[in-house]
Amino acid sequence: MQPVRPVVLAGTRNRPADVRSPGRPPGKDDVNEQAQLHQQLLDTLTAGGSLRTKPWKDAAATIPRHEFLRDGYFRSVHGAVPAAWEPVLDNDPDWLTGCCQDQSLITQIAGSIVPADIQGRIMREPTSSSTLPSLVLRMLEDLHVEAGAQVLEIGTGTGYSTALLCTRLGESHVTSVEYDEDVAARARAALARQGMFPRLVIGDGLLGCAGAAPYDRIIATCAVHTVPAAWIEQTKPGGLILTTIGGWLGASELARLTVHDDNTASGPLLSGQVSFMLARPHQAPPLGLLPDLSAGKERQAVFGPDVLSDWTTRFVVQNAAPHAQRLTLEHDGRTEDVLIDITTGSWAALHNNHAERWTVRQNGPENLWDTIEEHLTRWHTDGTPALQEFTLTVTPNRQSLHW
Protein backbone atom coordinates (compact mmCIF):
# COMPACT_ATOMS: atom_id res chain seq x y z
CA MET A 1 0.00 0.00 0.00
CA GLN A 2 1.36 3.39 -1.00
CA PRO A 3 1.36 5.91 1.87
CA VAL A 4 -1.01 8.82 1.51
CA ARG A 5 0.81 12.12 1.24
CA PRO A 6 -0.12 14.28 4.23
CA VAL A 7 -2.26 17.31 3.37
CA VAL A 8 -2.86 20.02 5.94
CA LEU A 9 -6.60 20.74 6.18
CA ALA A 10 -6.66 23.27 8.99
CA GLY A 11 -4.48 25.35 11.23
CA THR A 12 -5.80 28.60 9.86
CA ARG A 13 -8.39 30.93 11.34
CA ASN A 14 -10.44 30.94 8.11
CA ARG A 15 -13.75 29.32 8.97
CA PRO A 16 -15.40 26.96 6.47
CA ALA A 17 -18.25 28.48 4.51
CA ASP A 18 -20.85 26.43 6.42
CA VAL A 19 -20.28 25.39 10.00
CA ARG A 20 -23.97 25.17 10.98
CA SER A 21 -25.39 22.09 12.61
CA PRO A 22 -27.05 19.98 9.92
CA GLY A 23 -30.10 19.56 12.19
CA ARG A 24 -32.59 21.99 13.59
CA PRO A 25 -31.26 24.74 15.88
CA PRO A 26 -31.96 23.76 19.50
CA GLY A 27 -34.73 25.48 21.40
CA LYS A 28 -34.59 26.39 25.06
CA ASP A 29 -35.95 23.03 26.17
CA ASP A 30 -33.45 21.23 23.91
CA VAL A 31 -30.56 23.19 25.43
CA ASN A 32 -31.68 22.29 28.93
CA GLU A 33 -31.98 18.62 27.98
CA GLN A 34 -28.55 18.68 26.35
CA ALA A 35 -26.97 20.18 29.47
CA GLN A 36 -28.72 17.67 31.74
CA LEU A 37 -27.71 14.63 29.68
CA HIS A 38 -24.16 15.94 29.28
CA GLN A 39 -23.84 16.31 33.06
CA GLN A 40 -25.22 12.80 33.58
CA LEU A 41 -22.53 11.47 31.25
CA LEU A 42 -19.82 13.36 33.17
CA ASP A 43 -21.13 11.93 36.44
CA THR A 44 -21.00 8.43 34.96
CA LEU A 45 -17.41 8.88 33.77
CA THR A 46 -16.33 10.26 37.13
CA ALA A 47 -18.03 7.50 39.12
CA GLY A 48 -16.48 4.87 36.84
CA GLY A 49 -12.95 6.21 37.38
CA SER A 50 -12.29 7.25 33.77
CA LEU A 51 -12.43 10.96 34.60
CA ARG A 52 -10.05 11.48 37.50
CA THR A 53 -8.27 14.84 37.50
CA LYS A 54 -9.54 18.42 37.50
CA PRO A 55 -7.94 19.53 34.18
CA TRP A 56 -9.67 16.71 32.28
CA LYS A 57 -12.90 17.15 34.24
CA ASP A 58 -12.90 20.82 33.20
CA ALA A 59 -12.18 19.91 29.56
CA ALA A 60 -14.90 17.25 29.48
CA ALA A 61 -17.39 19.69 31.00
CA THR A 62 -16.61 22.19 28.23
CA ILE A 63 -16.91 19.77 25.30
CA PRO A 64 -20.29 18.10 24.72
CA ARG A 65 -19.93 14.87 22.79
CA HIS A 66 -23.17 15.31 20.87
CA GLU A 67 -21.74 18.31 19.01
CA PHE A 68 -19.40 15.88 17.26
CA LEU A 69 -22.21 13.56 16.22
CA ARG A 70 -24.40 16.10 14.40
CA ASP A 71 -24.06 13.98 11.24
CA GLY A 72 -25.74 11.11 13.07
CA TYR A 73 -24.66 7.59 13.90
CA PHE A 74 -25.72 4.00 13.30
CA ARG A 75 -27.28 1.76 15.93
CA SER A 76 -27.39 -2.00 15.71
CA VAL A 77 -30.67 -3.66 14.80
CA HIS A 78 -31.57 -5.91 17.71
CA GLY A 79 -31.68 -9.58 16.77
CA ALA A 80 -30.59 -9.07 13.17
CA VAL A 81 -28.60 -11.96 11.64
CA PRO A 82 -26.28 -11.10 10.04
CA ALA A 83 -25.59 -7.87 11.94
CA ALA A 84 -27.47 -4.88 10.58
CA TRP A 85 -27.36 -1.15 11.27
CA GLU A 86 -29.90 1.65 11.01
CA PRO A 87 -29.25 5.41 10.98
CA VAL A 88 -30.02 7.77 13.85
CA LEU A 89 -29.98 11.41 12.71
CA ASP A 90 -30.05 14.48 14.91
CA ASN A 91 -33.78 15.04 14.30
CA ASP A 92 -34.50 11.60 15.75
CA PRO A 93 -35.90 11.72 19.34
CA ASP A 94 -33.36 9.07 20.42
CA TRP A 95 -30.34 10.83 18.91
CA LEU A 96 -29.35 13.01 21.88
CA THR A 97 -29.85 10.27 24.47
CA GLY A 98 -27.66 7.93 22.43
CA CYS A 99 -24.93 10.57 22.09
CA CYS A 100 -24.81 11.00 25.87
CA GLN A 101 -24.47 7.32 26.68
CA ASP A 102 -21.10 5.78 27.50
CA GLN A 103 -21.02 3.64 24.39
CA SER A 104 -19.21 3.53 21.08
CA LEU A 105 -21.27 4.76 18.15
CA ILE A 106 -20.69 3.72 14.53
CA THR A 107 -20.32 6.74 12.26
CA GLN A 108 -19.27 5.16 8.96
CA ILE A 109 -19.90 1.82 7.27
CA ALA A 110 -18.12 0.14 4.36
CA GLY A 111 -15.51 2.89 4.06
CA SER A 112 -17.80 5.67 2.83
CA ILE A 113 -21.44 5.27 3.93
CA VAL A 114 -22.70 7.72 6.59
CA PRO A 115 -26.06 7.77 8.38
CA ALA A 116 -27.65 10.34 6.05
CA ASP A 117 -27.00 7.99 3.10
CA ILE A 118 -29.28 5.25 4.43
CA GLN A 119 -33.03 4.77 4.76
CA GLY A 120 -33.84 1.49 6.45
CA ARG A 121 -30.92 -0.73 7.38
CA ILE A 122 -27.54 -1.80 6.08
CA MET A 123 -25.61 -5.05 6.56
CA ARG A 124 -21.98 -4.08 5.97
CA GLU A 125 -18.90 -3.77 8.19
CA PRO A 126 -18.37 -0.60 10.29
CA THR A 127 -15.23 1.35 9.36
CA SER A 128 -15.28 4.36 11.67
CA SER A 129 -16.78 5.12 15.06
CA SER A 130 -17.02 7.52 17.96
CA THR A 131 -15.23 5.73 20.80
CA LEU A 132 -17.05 5.35 24.10
CA PRO A 133 -16.31 8.46 26.17
CA SER A 134 -15.01 6.53 29.19
CA LEU A 135 -12.21 5.11 27.06
CA VAL A 136 -11.45 8.48 25.43
CA LEU A 137 -11.09 10.19 28.81
CA ARG A 138 -9.29 7.28 30.40
CA MET A 139 -6.68 7.36 27.63
CA LEU A 140 -6.27 11.11 27.92
CA GLU A 141 -5.75 10.73 31.67
CA ASP A 142 -3.25 7.90 31.04
CA LEU A 143 -1.35 10.09 28.56
CA HIS A 144 0.02 12.13 31.49
CA VAL A 145 0.17 15.40 29.57
CA GLU A 146 1.51 18.59 31.07
CA ALA A 147 0.89 22.21 30.13
CA GLY A 148 2.86 23.17 27.04
CA ALA A 149 3.14 19.60 25.72
CA GLN A 150 3.03 19.05 21.97
CA VAL A 151 0.68 16.16 21.19
CA LEU A 152 0.19 14.12 18.03
CA GLU A 153 -3.13 12.32 17.76
CA ILE A 154 -3.40 9.40 15.35
CA GLY A 155 -6.98 9.12 14.16
CA THR A 156 -9.06 12.30 14.33
CA GLY A 157 -12.37 10.45 14.01
CA THR A 158 -15.27 12.70 14.93
CA GLY A 159 -12.93 15.28 16.46
CA TYR A 160 -14.25 14.81 20.02
CA SER A 161 -10.94 13.73 21.55
CA THR A 162 -9.15 16.38 19.47
CA ALA A 163 -11.39 19.02 21.01
CA LEU A 164 -10.66 17.74 24.50
CA LEU A 165 -6.93 18.01 23.81
CA CYS A 166 -7.36 21.54 22.43
CA THR A 167 -9.30 22.59 25.52
CA ARG A 168 -6.67 21.14 27.84
CA LEU A 169 -3.53 22.29 25.98
CA GLY A 170 -4.52 24.92 23.42
CA GLU A 171 -5.04 24.25 19.72
CA SER A 172 -1.48 25.28 18.79
CA HIS A 173 -0.22 22.27 20.77
CA VAL A 174 -2.38 19.70 18.96
CA THR A 175 -1.74 17.92 15.65
CA SER A 176 -4.19 15.27 14.51
CA VAL A 177 -3.86 12.91 11.54
CA GLU A 178 -6.81 11.18 9.87
CA TYR A 179 -6.50 8.66 7.04
CA ASP A 180 -10.03 9.08 5.64
CA GLU A 181 -10.57 12.37 3.84
CA ASP A 182 -14.35 12.43 4.39
CA VAL A 183 -14.01 11.63 8.09
CA ALA A 184 -11.41 14.39 8.40
CA ALA A 185 -13.69 16.92 6.67
CA ARG A 186 -16.56 16.20 9.07
CA ALA A 187 -14.23 16.49 12.07
CA ARG A 188 -12.88 19.77 10.78
CA ALA A 189 -16.40 21.19 10.48
CA ALA A 190 -17.34 19.97 13.97
CA LEU A 191 -14.21 21.50 15.49
CA ALA A 192 -14.83 24.76 13.67
CA ARG A 193 -18.35 24.91 15.14
CA GLN A 194 -16.61 24.88 18.53
CA GLY A 195 -14.22 27.61 17.41
CA MET A 196 -11.23 25.26 17.35
CA PHE A 197 -8.61 25.14 14.60
CA PRO A 198 -5.81 22.72 15.48
CA ARG A 199 -3.43 21.38 12.86
CA LEU A 200 -5.45 18.72 11.02
CA VAL A 201 -3.74 16.51 8.49
CA ILE A 202 -5.02 13.95 5.99
CA GLY A 203 -2.52 11.14 5.67
CA ASP A 204 -1.30 7.81 6.87
CA GLY A 205 -1.15 8.14 10.64
CA LEU A 206 1.33 5.27 10.79
CA LEU A 207 3.83 7.73 9.31
CA GLY A 208 3.11 10.27 12.02
CA CYS A 209 3.47 13.91 11.01
CA ALA A 210 7.11 14.86 10.63
CA GLY A 211 6.28 18.48 9.83
CA ALA A 212 5.27 19.29 13.40
CA ALA A 213 7.68 16.92 15.19
CA PRO A 214 9.09 16.34 17.73
CA TYR A 215 6.23 15.57 20.10
CA ASP A 216 6.04 15.13 23.84
CA ARG A 217 3.12 12.73 23.49
CA ILE A 218 1.59 10.56 20.78
CA ILE A 219 -1.84 9.02 21.28
CA ALA A 220 -3.46 6.62 18.83
CA THR A 221 -7.20 6.02 18.61
CA CYS A 222 -6.71 2.99 16.40
CA ALA A 223 -5.00 -0.32 17.15
CA VAL A 224 -1.71 -1.32 15.54
CA HIS A 225 -0.18 -4.73 14.93
CA THR A 226 3.29 -3.32 15.54
CA VAL A 227 4.33 0.14 16.74
CA PRO A 228 5.44 2.22 13.75
CA ALA A 229 9.07 3.35 13.76
CA ALA A 230 7.99 6.86 12.74
CA TRP A 231 6.18 7.35 16.05
CA ILE A 232 9.31 6.62 18.02
CA GLU A 233 11.46 8.77 15.76
CA GLN A 234 9.07 11.73 16.12
CA THR A 235 8.78 11.55 19.92
CA LYS A 236 11.24 13.34 22.17
CA PRO A 237 13.37 11.13 24.45
CA GLY A 238 11.41 10.74 27.64
CA GLY A 239 8.14 11.31 25.77
CA LEU A 240 5.24 8.88 25.84
CA ILE A 241 3.37 6.91 23.18
CA LEU A 242 -0.07 5.59 24.13
CA THR A 243 -1.42 3.04 21.68
CA THR A 244 -3.42 -0.15 21.49
CA ILE A 245 -1.57 -3.30 20.46
CA GLY A 246 -3.94 -5.55 18.55
CA GLY A 247 -3.78 -8.65 16.44
CA TRP A 248 -5.54 -10.96 14.05
CA LEU A 249 -7.02 -13.19 16.74
CA GLY A 250 -9.07 -10.29 18.05
CA ALA A 251 -7.41 -9.47 21.38
CA SER A 252 -5.82 -6.10 22.14
CA GLU A 253 -4.48 -4.06 25.02
CA LEU A 254 -3.40 -0.49 25.68
CA ALA A 255 0.35 0.11 26.00
CA ARG A 256 2.15 3.20 27.31
CA LEU A 257 5.70 3.39 25.99
CA THR A 258 8.51 5.68 27.06
CA VAL A 259 10.85 6.67 24.25
CA HIS A 260 14.57 6.33 24.96
CA ASP A 261 17.67 8.08 23.62
CA ASP A 262 18.67 5.04 21.54
CA ASN A 263 15.55 5.17 19.35
CA THR A 264 13.82 2.38 21.28
CA ALA A 265 10.72 2.44 23.43
CA SER A 266 9.34 0.29 26.21
CA GLY A 267 6.58 0.29 28.75
CA PRO A 268 3.74 -1.61 30.39
CA LEU A 269 0.40 -2.78 29.16
CA LEU A 270 -2.50 -1.06 30.92
CA SER A 271 -5.36 -3.24 32.08
CA GLY A 272 -8.86 -3.02 30.70
CA GLN A 273 -9.37 -5.08 27.51
CA VAL A 274 -9.17 -2.00 25.30
CA SER A 275 -10.44 -2.62 21.80
CA PHE A 276 -10.02 -0.40 18.73
CA MET A 277 -10.30 -1.09 15.03
CA LEU A 278 -6.90 -2.02 13.61
CA ALA A 279 -5.34 0.65 11.40
CA ARG A 280 -6.34 -0.26 7.85
CA PRO A 281 -2.81 -1.13 6.68
CA HIS A 282 -2.44 -3.42 9.74
CA GLN A 283 -5.63 -5.38 9.19
CA ALA A 284 -5.38 -9.08 8.39
CA PRO A 285 -4.87 -9.79 4.68
CA PRO A 286 -7.13 -12.26 2.86
CA LEU A 287 -6.16 -15.86 3.52
CA GLY A 288 -6.37 -16.86 -0.12
CA LEU A 289 -6.19 -20.54 -1.09
CA LEU A 290 -6.26 -22.78 1.98
CA PRO A 291 -3.56 -25.44 2.40
CA ASP A 292 -4.30 -29.16 2.22
CA LEU A 293 -5.69 -29.68 5.72
CA SER A 294 -5.63 -33.46 5.36
CA ALA A 295 -1.83 -33.46 5.48
CA GLY A 296 0.33 -33.16 8.59
CA LYS A 297 0.92 -35.16 11.75
CA GLU A 298 -1.58 -35.62 14.56
CA ARG A 299 -1.08 -35.74 18.30
CA GLN A 300 -3.06 -35.18 21.46
CA ALA A 301 -3.17 -31.48 22.29
CA VAL A 302 -2.27 -30.10 25.70
CA PHE A 303 -4.49 -27.05 25.11
CA GLY A 304 -7.53 -26.86 22.87
CA PRO A 305 -8.88 -23.88 20.95
CA ASP A 306 -11.49 -23.42 23.68
CA VAL A 307 -8.83 -21.49 25.65
CA LEU A 308 -9.14 -18.74 23.03
CA SER A 309 -12.53 -17.76 24.44
CA ASP A 310 -10.64 -16.07 27.28
CA TRP A 311 -9.43 -12.58 26.32
CA THR A 312 -6.13 -12.72 28.21
CA THR A 313 -5.26 -16.21 27.00
CA ARG A 314 -6.07 -15.19 23.45
CA PHE A 315 -3.74 -12.21 23.79
CA VAL A 316 -0.95 -14.52 24.99
CA VAL A 317 -1.57 -16.88 22.05
CA GLN A 318 -1.60 -13.93 19.69
CA ASN A 319 1.80 -12.89 21.01
CA ALA A 320 3.13 -16.41 20.35
CA ALA A 321 1.73 -16.48 16.80
CA PRO A 322 1.38 -12.85 15.71
CA HIS A 323 0.69 -13.67 12.05
CA ALA A 324 -1.90 -16.38 12.63
CA GLN A 325 -5.53 -16.13 11.60
CA ARG A 326 -8.32 -18.36 12.90
CA LEU A 327 -11.25 -19.92 11.09
CA THR A 328 -13.76 -22.68 11.77
CA LEU A 329 -14.77 -25.15 9.07
CA GLU A 330 -16.18 -28.60 8.44
CA HIS A 331 -13.59 -31.27 7.58
CA ASP A 332 -14.15 -35.03 7.31
CA GLY A 333 -17.58 -34.67 8.89
CA ARG A 334 -16.43 -32.76 11.98
CA THR A 335 -15.92 -29.16 13.02
CA GLU A 336 -12.30 -28.06 13.18
CA ASP A 337 -10.67 -24.90 14.51
CA VAL A 338 -7.86 -23.91 12.16
CA LEU A 339 -5.02 -21.44 12.68
CA ILE A 340 -2.96 -20.43 9.66
CA ASP A 341 0.26 -18.39 9.79
CA ILE A 342 0.15 -16.36 6.60
CA THR A 343 3.86 -15.53 6.66
CA THR A 344 5.19 -19.08 6.91
CA GLY A 345 2.26 -21.12 5.62
CA SER A 346 2.30 -23.21 8.80
CA TRP A 347 -1.09 -24.33 10.07
CA ALA A 348 -2.75 -26.26 12.87
CA ALA A 349 -6.20 -27.87 12.86
CA LEU A 350 -7.82 -28.96 16.13
CA HIS A 351 -10.90 -31.03 16.84
CA ASN A 352 -12.51 -32.53 19.91
CA ASN A 353 -12.41 -36.32 19.93
CA HIS A 354 -15.56 -36.50 22.09
CA ALA A 355 -13.59 -37.63 25.15
CA GLU A 356 -13.01 -34.09 26.42
CA ARG A 357 -9.64 -34.23 24.72
CA TRP A 358 -8.38 -32.28 21.77
CA THR A 359 -6.40 -33.59 18.82
CA VAL A 360 -4.16 -31.31 16.79
CA ARG A 361 -2.95 -31.88 13.25
CA GLN A 362 -0.29 -29.47 11.95
CA ASN A 363 1.99 -28.99 9.01
CA GLY A 364 4.32 -26.43 7.46
CA PRO A 365 7.81 -25.07 8.11
CA GLU A 366 6.99 -24.68 11.82
CA ASN A 367 4.76 -26.63 14.21
CA LEU A 368 2.41 -23.74 14.93
CA TRP A 369 0.46 -25.28 17.80
CA ASP A 370 3.69 -26.52 19.42
CA THR A 371 4.89 -22.91 19.57
CA ILE A 372 1.58 -21.77 21.04
CA GLU A 373 1.52 -24.52 23.65
CA GLU A 374 5.10 -23.80 24.71
CA HIS A 375 4.17 -20.16 25.22
CA LEU A 376 1.00 -21.00 27.15
CA THR A 377 2.81 -23.59 29.31
CA ARG A 378 5.47 -21.03 30.26
CA TRP A 379 2.77 -18.49 31.09
CA HIS A 380 0.90 -21.00 33.28
CA THR A 381 4.13 -22.10 34.98
CA ASP A 382 4.75 -18.46 35.90
CA GLY A 383 1.31 -18.20 37.47
CA THR A 384 -0.63 -16.70 34.51
CA PRO A 385 0.54 -13.10 35.08
CA ALA A 386 -2.06 -10.46 34.31
CA LEU A 387 -1.57 -8.39 31.18
CA GLN A 388 -0.61 -5.30 33.21
CA GLU A 389 2.47 -7.27 34.27
CA PHE A 390 3.60 -7.47 30.62
CA THR A 391 6.19 -5.11 29.14
CA LEU A 392 6.29 -4.16 25.49
CA THR A 393 9.70 -3.37 24.01
CA VAL A 394 10.16 -1.87 20.55
CA THR A 395 13.54 -1.59 18.80
CA PRO A 396 14.35 -0.66 15.20
CA ASN A 397 14.44 -4.38 14.38
CA ARG A 398 11.70 -6.03 16.42
CA GLN A 399 8.81 -5.79 18.85
CA SER A 400 8.56 -8.12 21.83
CA LEU A 401 6.32 -8.71 24.84
CA HIS A 402 7.45 -10.33 28.06
CA TRP A 403 6.23 -10.66 31.62
Image (cartoon, rainbow, N blue to C red):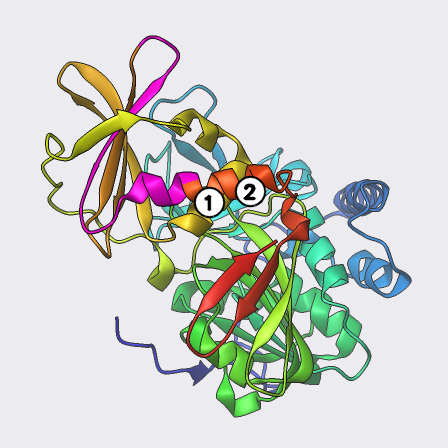
Report the Cα–Cα distance between label 1 and label 2. 6 Å
Q: Is residue 202 left or right of residue 337?
A: right
Question: How far from the left and from the top, in percent, is residue 346?
Answer: 22, 47
Establish if 4 lies above or below 80.
Answer: below
Res 61 label = none
Q: In this figure, which residue is indicated by the disc labeled 1? A: 375
Q: Is residue 257 left or right of residue 324?
A: right
Type of the residue with mark 1: His
Instruction: Please check the rendered image and state whether residue 147 is part of the magenta-colored stretch, yes or no.
Output: no
Query: Which region of the structure is painted magenta?
Result: 354-373
The reply to whether residue 127 is visible in this rendering is no
Q: Please tell me which residue is depicted at 52% across the width and 65% down the height of the picture.
A: 155
Helix, strand or loop at label 2? It is helix
Neighbor class of circle 1 (other Cα within 10 Å; few <14, some 14-19, many 20+) is some
Establish if 14 lies above or below 330.
Answer: below
Neighbor class of circle 2 (other Cα within 10 Å; few <14, some 14-19, many 20+) is some
Question: How far from the left and from the top, in percent, is residue 232?
Answer: 54, 79
Q: Nearer the viewer, residue 371 or 134?
A: 371
Q: Please tell me which residue is depicted at 68% across the width and 41% down the height of the picture.
A: 102
Q: Please tell me which residue is depicted at 15% across the width and 35% down the height of the picture.
A: 296
- Asked if the residue under mark 2 is in contact with the one under mark 1, i.e. CB atoms within 8 Å, the reply is yes
Helix, strand or loop at label 1? It is helix
Res 379 label = 2
Type of the residue with mark 2: Trp
Residue placed furthest toward the right: 54
Q: Nearer the viewer, residue 123 or 70?
A: 123
Question: How far from the left and from the top, in percent, is residue 84?
Answer: 38, 31
